[in-house]
Image: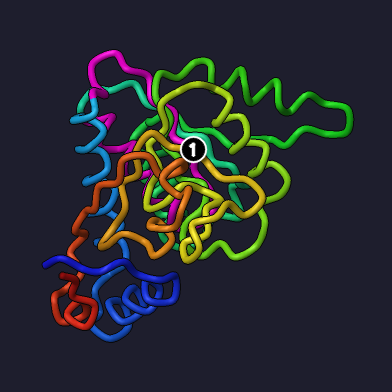
Amino acid sequence: MKVRPLSRDEVRGIDARAAEGLGLPTLVLMENAGRGAAEWLRRLGVGGSTRVLIACGPGNNGGDGGVVARHLDAWEVPVRVVWFAEADRLRGDAATQRDILARSGIDQSYWEPGGPGEDEAGRLDALLSGADWVVDGLLGTGLMRDVEGTLRAAIEAMNRSGKPIVALDLPSGLDADTGRPLGAAVRARATATFVAPKLGFAAPGAGDFTGEVAVFDIGVPRCLLEPFRGP
């Protein structure tokens, strides 16, 4: 069924009701989201020797990126995962995806923030230069304050890299409700969004960040989506 654009709180409420009310494991929804995004990447032209860098944050958006990595690897696409978080900061489903990647032998690493006087921007530029495509799994819909520190530096480096970027659910740094960047936001070529478009996608100027938007069904039962049925 077609679902109308959703706010941040509506998205989080649906996720909570699916897990707590219906007992639907969040890992199932994450798997469906990541596979849908990976399949769209193939339709966008990713395949063969295309080198894909997946930038993952510490939360569920990063976990989605881990799923994308597994499917691309299964299709023999060269993929590298970089977690922009310390290993011990990963929790829940993101940590599960990290562990699966490790046991699968998929290339993953953890970004070390630069110390005083270090050229972190230069290191990020060098990291991105080795990719043909970039997948943005840094930050999800829960963001409500300006992006700072290494995550902001990573977003800015992705934007200046000139590489085609596919964002997972929404471009990192974009406010899900207003469609405005919170300090900085990824300018994606395309956005694989899950369940429904986000409310902010219709805001003036938001398309400069989302690029082409495709909506993917991730298996949320219809009983939870019926109240949000769209035209």
Give the quarter of the figure containing the C terminus: bottom left
Measured as percent of width and height from the top left, residue 53 is found at: 44, 28
Say which element carries label 1.
loop
Q: Nearer the viewer, residue 148 or 229?
A: 229
Q: Residue furthest right?
A: 116
Depth check, front residue: 42 or 91: 42
Kind of residue at disc 1: Arg
Q: Is residue 217 magenta?
A: no
16 or 94: nearer the eye?
16
* Left or right of residue 190, residue 177 in this image: right
Quadrant of the image occupied by residue 220: bottom left
Q: Quadrant of residue 78?
A: top left
Is 36 positioned to the left or the right of 101 in the image? left
Q: Bounds of the magenta span?
A: 45-74
Q: Which residue is tagged 1?
A: 187
Q: Residue furthest front?
A: 204
Q: Quadrant of the N terminus?
A: bottom left
Q: Residue at x 27, y 77 (%)?
A: 18
Apparent side of residue 101 relative to residue 84 in the rendered image (left or right): left
In the rendered structure, the answer to whether residue 28 lies left or right of residue 178 reads: left
Query: Would you place residue 102 above or below residue 221 in this image?
Result: above
Q: Residue at x 42, y 51 (%)?
A: 170
Does residue 24 appear in this view? yes
Quadrant of the rendered image containing residue 27? bottom left
- Identify which residue is drawn at 43% across, 37% down: 188
